[in-house]
Amino acid sequence: YTGKTSTQLLTENLKNIYVKDYQSLPVVVNENVSVYDAIVTVFLEDVGTLYVVDNEAHLVGVLSRKDLLRASLGNKDLTSLPVHIIMTRMPNITYCKKDDLLIDVAKKLIEKQIDSMPIVKETEKGLEVVGRITKTNITKAFVELADGD
Ligand code: ADP
């Protein structure tokens, strides 16, 4: 018997769960694709958020469902509106690394009021998108913690 309270044990477990254990595959689009094509991608790939990259495959922006809905209001021609016009752009992107603790990412999602963040690898030339972490991933970790996996 360790003499630890259940809260202490839970805290210890939480500090052993990393982003890399629960990540999903990222869905990325080039900054020059149209809003129309981005919306089609959201349906085809069944994701809520797209990450936007430049021609060197470096992270430049984020597109949420609401960003795309907002751009769709009115009579704009969505096939000739590039996503870089409407995306949330760097340096205002919240991201994480695969070796970050999942609990820290969960806190950041709440603090920034966002549903997901890209997992990146830093290179000399920019940020490479290697994964995606969402509220759904974190909910799954939460359930597995309860089931004692
Ligand atoms: P939705 O807009 O569909 O509710 P979010 O809550 O995730 O989805 O996004 C809210 C706003 O925050 C959007 O404008 C989106 O572009 C932006 N956003 C989403 N994820 C991030 C992120 N990781 N870093 C910075 N901004 C983000």
Image: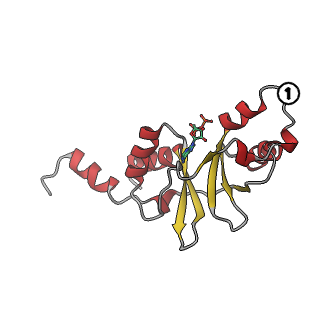
For label 1, the SS is loop
* Left or right, residue 19 beside residue 129: left
Q: Label 1: which residue? A: 75
In the image as oriented, which residue stretches furthest toward the bottom?
124
Q: Which residue is at a point 48% across and 43% down the rendered structure image? A: 139
Quarter holding the N terminus is: bottom left
Residue depicted at x 35% and y 60%: 16
Give coordinates of residue 132: x percent, y percent: 57, 55
Left or right side of 120 for 76: right
Q: Position of residue 114 (x, y in %)?
A: 52, 40
> Above or below — where is 68 with respect to 95?
above
Residue closest to the eye, 101 or 111:
111
Q: Report if residue 25 is visible in the image.
A: no
> Where is residue 115 shown, x and y percent of the image?
54, 41
Name the residue located 34 percent from the left edge and 53 percent from the top edge: 14
Quadrant that contains the C terminus: bottom left
- In the displayed structure, 129 sits above or below 135; it is below
Q: Nearer the viewer, residue 22 or 9?
A: 22
Comparing 67 with 8, the one in front is 67
Q: Is residue 43 visible?
A: yes
Graded by Cα atoms within 10 Å as few (under 14), some (14 to 19) or many (20 or more), the crowding at tag 1 reads few
- Residue 32 falls left or right of residue 117: right
Using the image as rendered, state which of residue 112 and residue 104 is in the foreground.
112
Q: Where residue 76 sits: x, y (%)?
A: 84, 32
Ligand 1, by image quadrant, is top right
Is ligand 1 within 8 Å of the beta carbon of the residue shown at mark 1? no
Vertical side of 65 occupied by 3: above or below: below
Q: At label 1, which amino acid type do we have? A: Asn
Q: Quadrant of residue 143?
A: top left
Colouring scheme applied when the structure was drawn: secondary structure
Q: Image point 52% across, 48% down: which residue?
A: 92
Task: Tell me if 57 is positioned left or right of 123 in this view.
Answer: right
